[in-house]
Image (cartoon, rainbow, N blue to C red):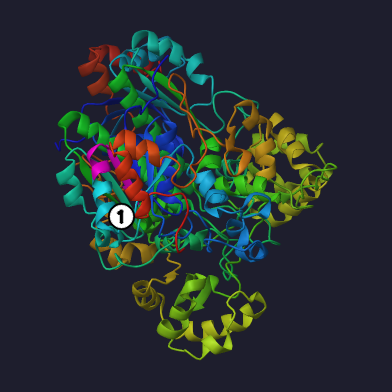
């Protein structure tokens, strides 16, 4: 076992789906013992999301579940039953952290609300992740990826001015916010350990998204300063390249700053005469004309050639990679951003790995994501002292 | 009354653009004393300006949304204190000035290192080193320092020295090709800085992880974030499908992999008299139909029109198959209603739906208002406006928000109170152009 920063921390995990599961994955991958409580029979919803090896659905082989739950332990409990709720409470007594992502009010209905839990564990940090927060008129709204994206801010300005708003790829927003929630949870842990203050953290995905350093945060201020609603924009500055352009084997994205225009035409394209032909970089009326010259040059080069030529000159030209490109990218591979994980049922695959680099605080996969209820015996019998016979009885009652 | 969460933690912030500035703001809101170290002689792009450090008023319209963000489109005498993006992103921090490219400035920097806990920055590889700011020296001066740095591609590997803004890095990580209407017309690209924000989240996590380790071991550490690679995990679904099945996905616009889903036009809301300019008909609602229950909810909300009883929409598979036609019929209904009205009609029937909020909507949204998400702050040079409050709500240590600093506004405090600089020395530092409140030669 590697000694990790959170090796002495126990987390009771009532999350499912992407945001909550990524939050507790961050804790588990840095050493916390994360006990994931799943619903008997079906478990976490992401067990059904896939992708599945050979497209063969199996709750133990869902790629998203396997990725989001590395290093965690799984027990099953029906929290609606007295016994299930009591066991969860027993576990919460010895945990430093509880993370949950039920709809607001559900933990209270299970008798597991913060007010109850802090009676038995005053120093507990309880992170409650929900789409809209624990209070307010939208509290009980139903949400999906796109609903969060629309109400959270980035959607209105994503897309073409005339094309209507368009969402980001599936999962990126909730995973990002789960990451933020992991930071919030560590802040809670710091406060508990440093000051002896336990508390609930009301983490609203909508608010975190509205507040985050994607452009909407600046847009809300710009709107008030200039009295105009920031629109969907696909433009950069004047005629300077901004956007996607075709090249020999695909597409590249280019974002050139005004000051870098000479570097683009003289050094990268080797066409100094363009400086005279396009003297005013702010003249957007000549953008199409410049773009056609640029594209004629681009289509002679592959996307990897282009980043390797432009990158060292400080120019932002980079490929629109697909996952095959990403997995085979030499930079990513040299830096070891993927990790091979062998899951006994699903098989061995390369997963997106450590988030950042630091030798003093190792990131490590000690075990693959758990099978549903894999740790029932370890946690319920060995730790809490229920006998094997009682476990059988709880199974028969559907509690476990 | 409880203390603030991070009370007693001092942070040096030399962050730029989007990513780590956000980290600094979050630390500041939780009670850390976050000190920006800025230079009077150097104006990094997209920090206190969006392209031109001292834009002429007439020039603002050419600078795009981010570039023109000055109160009433008036850059004023000290535009660096009135720039919207800075004032939005650098809330709850202090500002001191020192020219760290000069030996004296570097000495001041290391004096501050001695009495600080955390250092965050996201300059390109080599920028810090060139000024003489290195991990080795920081560690020597203060072995307990937690240093978190980020760059586009990290500090090793073949791309380490490449320039990269968030959008470039998102392209390399695989997101940009997936976030468009389809793969046919890829020419355009709207702005996204989610990979920056995600590096900000990574840095927050790394700072707090580093502080906890320091609590246990007494040692500081240095964390290195590669902004592009940090984002790959966010595409987990696509990564795992490639790893497991070799499958590559196309951009599918607002469609979902499993559900009926879309973004539908709504009726425009007329601006109230005296209201600021609105975007006319540019109003939208998003709807997801995961199953029969939600489909029936949609039918009820629409008043159960005859077409909805057609066999081709009878089950989820049929609806997915006839998605294009269904979209048109749903939009014919939504376009007769206000986006909030559609959202409420559907949510009342337990159907996931949401209005696509623009900045005006966000600042007036009843839910965000009731929860007190935005906080009104009076900035000494930009006026009174609403800014985002703490990103999450801590019930016992709720945090605080104060306006982004004017350049050098905390020099007296930092130099005299924290660093113990004498009045004579302070005057000398003014003469040597370390201390001041305005750019010189920029």
* Residue B156 visible at all: yes
Q: Which residue is drawn at 37% across and 11% down?
A: A86
B227 vs A287, left or right, is: left
Residue B203 against residue B439 in the figure, above or below: above
Q: Are there few (<14), some (14-19), or many (20+) residues within 10 Å of tag 1? A: many
Which residue appears at 77% of the width and 37% of the height? Answer: B341
The magenta stretch spans residue B120:
yes
Q: What's the chain of the residue with tag 1? A: B
Q: Can residue A215 be seen in this view?
A: no
Q: Is residue B169 left or right of residue A370?
A: right
Please identify the residue farthest to the front as the structure is shown. B424
Q: Nearer the viewer, residue B190 or A38?
A: B190
| Residue on which the image places disc 1 | B100
Question: Which element is circle 1 on?
Answer: loop
State the image quarter where residue A392 is shown: top left
Q: What stretch is highlighted in magenta?
A: B111-121
Q: In this view, does B308 lie to the left or right of B204?
A: right
Q: Nearer the viewer, residue B46 or B427?
A: B427
Residue A330 placement (x, y as % from top left): 28, 67
């Amino acid at each position: 076992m590697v000694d990790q920063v959170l090796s002495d921390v126990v987390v009771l995990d009532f999350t499912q789906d992407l945001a909550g599961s990524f939050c507790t994955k961050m804790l588990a991958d840095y050493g916390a013992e994360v006990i994931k409580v799943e619903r008997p029979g079906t478990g976490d919803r992401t067990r059904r999301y896939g992708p599945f090896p050979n497209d063969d659905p199996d709750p133990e082989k869902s790629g998203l579940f396997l990725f989001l739950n590395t290093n965690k332990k799984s027990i099953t409990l029906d929290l609606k039953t007295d016994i299930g709720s009591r066991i969860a409470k027993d576990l919460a007594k010895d945990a430093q952290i509880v993370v949950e992502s039920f709809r607001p009010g559900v933990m209270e209905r299970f008798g597991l609300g913060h007010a109850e839990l802090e009676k038995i564990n005053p120093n507990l940090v309880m992170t409650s992740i929900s789409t809209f927060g624990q209070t307010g008129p939208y509290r009980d709204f139903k949400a999906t990826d796109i609903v969060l994206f629309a109400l959270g801010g980035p959607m209105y300005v994503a897309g073409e001015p005339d094309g209507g708003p368009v969402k980001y790829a599936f999962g990126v927003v909730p995973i990002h916010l789960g990451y933020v929630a992991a930071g919030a949870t560590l802040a809670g842990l710091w406060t508990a350990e440093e000051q002896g203050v336990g508390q609930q953290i009301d983490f609203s995905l909508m608010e975190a998204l509205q507040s985050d350093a994607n452009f909407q945060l600046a847009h809300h201020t710009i709107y008030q300063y200039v009295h105009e609603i920031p629109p969907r924009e696909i433009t950069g500055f004047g005629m300077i390249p901004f956007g996607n352009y075709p090249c020999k084997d695909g597409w590249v994205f280019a974002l050139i700053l005004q000051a870098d225009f000479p570097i683009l035409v003289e050094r990268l394209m080797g066409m100094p005469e363009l400086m005279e032909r396009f003297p005013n970089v702010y003249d957007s009326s000549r953008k199409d004309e410049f773009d056609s010259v640029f594209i004629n040059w681009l289509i002679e080069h592959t996307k990897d050639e282009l980043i390797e030529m432009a990158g060292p000159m400080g120019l932002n030209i980079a490929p629109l990679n697909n996952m095959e490109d990403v997995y085979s990218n030499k930079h990513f591979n040299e830096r070891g951003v993927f990790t091979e994980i062998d899951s006994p049922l699903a098989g061995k695959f390369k997963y997106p790995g450590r988030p950042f680099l630091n030798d003093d605080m190792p990131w490590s996969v000690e075990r693959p994501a758990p099978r549903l209820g894999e740790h029932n015996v370890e946690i319920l019998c060995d730790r809490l002292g229920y006998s094997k016979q009682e476990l059988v009885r709880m199974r028969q009652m559907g509690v476990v | 009354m409880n203390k603030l969460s991070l009370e007693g933690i001092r942070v040096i912030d030399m962050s730029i653009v989007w990513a780590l500035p956000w980290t600094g703001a979050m630390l500041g809101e939780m009670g850390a004393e976050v000190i920006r170290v800025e230079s009077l002689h150097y104006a990094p792009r997209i920090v206190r300006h969006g392209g031109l450090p001292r834009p002429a008023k007439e020039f603002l319209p050419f600078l795009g949304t981010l570039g023109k963000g000055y109160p009433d489109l008036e850059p004023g005498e000290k535009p660096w204190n009135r720039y919207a993006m800075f004032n939005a992103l650098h809330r709850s921090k202090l500002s001191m000035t020192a020219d760290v490219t000069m030996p004296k400035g570097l000495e001041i920097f290391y004096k501050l290192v001695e009495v600080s806990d955390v250092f965050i920055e996201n300059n390109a590889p080599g920028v810090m080193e060139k000024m003489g700011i290195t991990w080795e020296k920081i560690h020597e001066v203060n072995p307990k320092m937690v240093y978190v740095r980020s760059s586009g591609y990290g500090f090793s590997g073949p791309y380490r020295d490449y320039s990269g803004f968030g959008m470039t890095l998102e392209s390399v990580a695989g997101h940009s090709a997936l976030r468009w209407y389809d793969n046919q017309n890829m020419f355009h690209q709207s702005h996204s800085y989610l990979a920056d924000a995600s590096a900000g989240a990574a840095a927050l996590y790394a700072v707090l992880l580093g502080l906890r380790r320091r609590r246990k071991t007494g040692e500081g550490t240095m964390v290195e974030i590669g902004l592009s690679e940090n984002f790959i995990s966010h595409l987990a679904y696509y990564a795992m499908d490639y790893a497991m099945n070799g499958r590559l996905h196309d951009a599918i616009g607002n469609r979902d992999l499993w559900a009926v889903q879309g973004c539908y036009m709504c009726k425009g809301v007329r601006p109230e008299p005296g209201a600021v300019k609105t975007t006319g008909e540019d109003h939208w609602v998003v709807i997801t139909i995961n199953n029969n229950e939600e489909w029936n909810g949609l039918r009820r909300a629409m008043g159960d029109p005859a077409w909805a009883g057609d066999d081709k929409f009878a089950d989820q598979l049929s609806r997915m198959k006839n998605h294009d036609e269904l979209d048109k019929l749903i939009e014919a209904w939504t376009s007769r209603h206000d986006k909030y009205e559609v959202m409420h009609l559907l949510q009342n029937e337990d159907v996931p739906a949401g209005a696509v909020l623009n900045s005006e909507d966000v600042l007036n949204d009843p839910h965000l208002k009731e929860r007190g998400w935005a906080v009104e702050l009076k900035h000494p040079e930009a006026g009174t406006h609403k800014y985002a409050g703490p990103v999450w709500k801590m019930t016992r240590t709720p945090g605080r928000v104060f306006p982004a600093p004017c350049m050098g506004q905390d020099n007296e405090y930092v130099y005299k109170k924290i660093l113990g600089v004498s009045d004579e020395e302070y005057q000398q530092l003014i003469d040597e152009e370390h201390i001041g409140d305005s750019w010189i030669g920029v």
